[in-house]
Image (spheres, rainbow, N blue to C red):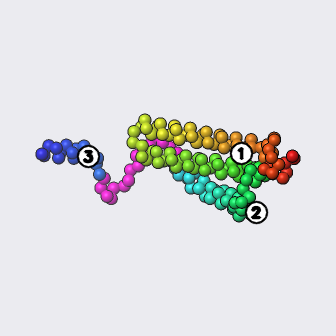
Amino acid sequence: MADTATEAQASAPEIAAPRDRYKRKKTTRGNYELYSWVFMRASGVLLIVLIFGHLFVNLMVGDGVHAIDFAFVGGKWSSPFWQVWDLLMLWLAMFHGTNGVRTVINDYAERDGVRMTLKVLLYLAAVITVVLGTLVIFTFSPCPHGAPADLVPAFCSA
């Protein structure tokens, strides 16, 4: 019995005395996690502004939610200001969310293979969403050829 207790004490990590100075372990990760943490805070604040601005314009100005249709979106995205606004909102939301899920994967996926697979799938989904969303915002035609006149914005020539 004494042998197993001695072995357990020998294999247990050494606990420093409470008043000893903390010695930081040298890591090679750099400041990536610090920059990631700062990005989450800054992008969160900017996303609040972008999202509430988006909601205010879409739901409170004009006829509110009843005015949202193809013509409303077409008229809004005919302006470069709203294209950039929605693009920033899309990109920040995707990068913010991807970084958050990456952190959750790092915290809860125990095996390296599972962690790597989940992160590759996460990054792939994020890239596909950002690319497709960007294409939609910049290639959207508010005046599609052959569309019924009552569905297109007033500035489109029939």
Classify 10 Å Cα crowding around label 2: few (below 14), some (14-19), many (20 and above): few
Above or below, comparing residue 124 to residue 36 in the picture: above
Taking depth in this image into account, of 19 and 28 the one nearest to the observer is 28
Labels 3 and 1 touching (C-beta < 8 A)? no
Above or below, comparing residue 58 to residue 94 in the picture: below
**Image location of residue 16, percent across then percent down:** 31, 53
**Image location of residue 88, percent across then percent down:** 67, 50
**Image location of residue 96, percent across then percent down:** 57, 50
Residue bearing the label numbered 1:
137
Q: Secondary structure at mark 3?
A: loop
Disc 3 and disc 2: Cα gap in Å?
68 Å
Q: Tell me which residue sits at (61%, 42%) in the image.
A: 129
Mark 3 or mark 2: which is in front?
2
Taking depth in this image into account, of 41 and 68 the one nearest to the observer is 68
Please tell me whether residue 23 belongs to the stretch shown in magenta: yes
Disc 3 and disc 1: Cα gap in Å?
58 Å
